[in-house]
Image (cartoon, rainbow, N blue to C red):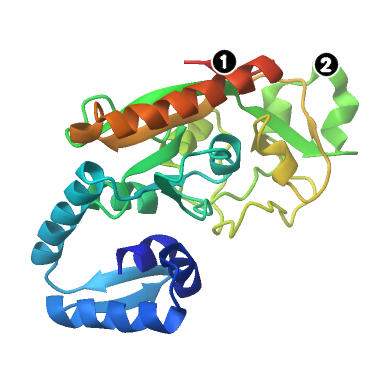
Amino acid sequence: MDLLLWLRNGQAAAERLATSQPSVSRRVNHVAQVFGLQLYKSKGEWLVDGDGGLLAQERRVHQLYRWHNGHPLRLEAQGYSGPLFCPGLSTDWIQGNFDFFEVHTPMRHLREGVIDAWIGTYPDLPDAEDLELVCVHLTRYPIHLVVLDGHPLLDLGASISLDQVRRYPFFPLADGAFPQAQAQFEALQLWSSASPVEDWQLVPSDPLSVAPATVFTMGHFGAKRVTLPVEIPMVSGDSLVVRREFAEHPRLQALLEHLRHRAMELAATTPEVTCC
């Protein structure tokens, strides 16, 4: 059931379990009956309705069993981070779909024990005082403002100012999807509320919009984007997030060794990237 909640797709859960989709459905229905719960789907996410107290305790037992008895652990990553960091990863980890375009769901799964680790995107991470979760920072790189090739702002050349950029609509990101980054954009007077973006093929309807991008997300736009020659005081990056109790576990340290090695490779081949 937790694989279905995490991966949001019965076929994907069946593939991870090396079984059939009907088998997954039967098992999920049985678990829901045992715990007296109802599963329903809202905005693409499977949610559980009912008293989840016993389920939470059962998840706790299952997660401890995974960590301490060599069973595969569950790793999610934010969009582009999965393909960047997970190639060559040990089969000790089951990889997610890497298709969340918000931070609340994967963070909830991590807190509830549905998944075991998450590669999140800075700055939308738990703070240092979080009692449950701890972050291990991997990389940092600047956030740029980009526009379609041929955009009128490009005619201004190096003389462009942020005030001139603000005259154009900002890329339609979903309100609250990345709250800490959104707050920074709002402080720069660049934010405009819009409906959610459905996937990483980011194609805004307004060709005059200005979009945020990093060296790793430029390729996800549907058409060629050009970086504006104006800097903003914002950075992004990748960080591993895990429950505090597992931060020193040998299996977590083995994962970190892989991720840090990959971060160093990215820094060596991409000038904008620095290792933390």
Residue in the image at 43% along x and 74% along y? 19
Q: Is residue 51 above or below residue 225?
A: below
Name the secondary structure under disc 2. Answer: helix
| Left or right, 156 with reference to 127 | right
The disc label shown at residue 99, or none: none
The disc label shown at residue 274, or none: 1
First along the sequence among labels 1 and 2: 2
Residue in the image at 87% along x and 36% along y? 152
Q: Is residue 98 above or below residue 217?
A: below
Query: Which one is nearer the viewer's eye here, 232 or 120?
Result: 120
Q: Quadrant of residue 146?
A: top right
Q: Amino acid at mark 2?
A: Ala
The image position of residue 227, as x and y in percent, is: 77, 28
| Closer mark to the observer between disc 1 and disc 2 | 1
Query: Which one is nearer the viewer's eye here, 120 or 129?
Result: 120
Res 234 seen here: no
The disc label shown at residue 158, or none: 2
Q: Is residue 38 above or below residue 181?
A: below
Q: Residues within 10 Å of mark 2 (few under 14, many from 20)?
A: few
Query: Which one is nearer the viewer's eye here, 255 or 9?
Result: 255
The image position of residue 23, as x and y in percent, is: 38, 81
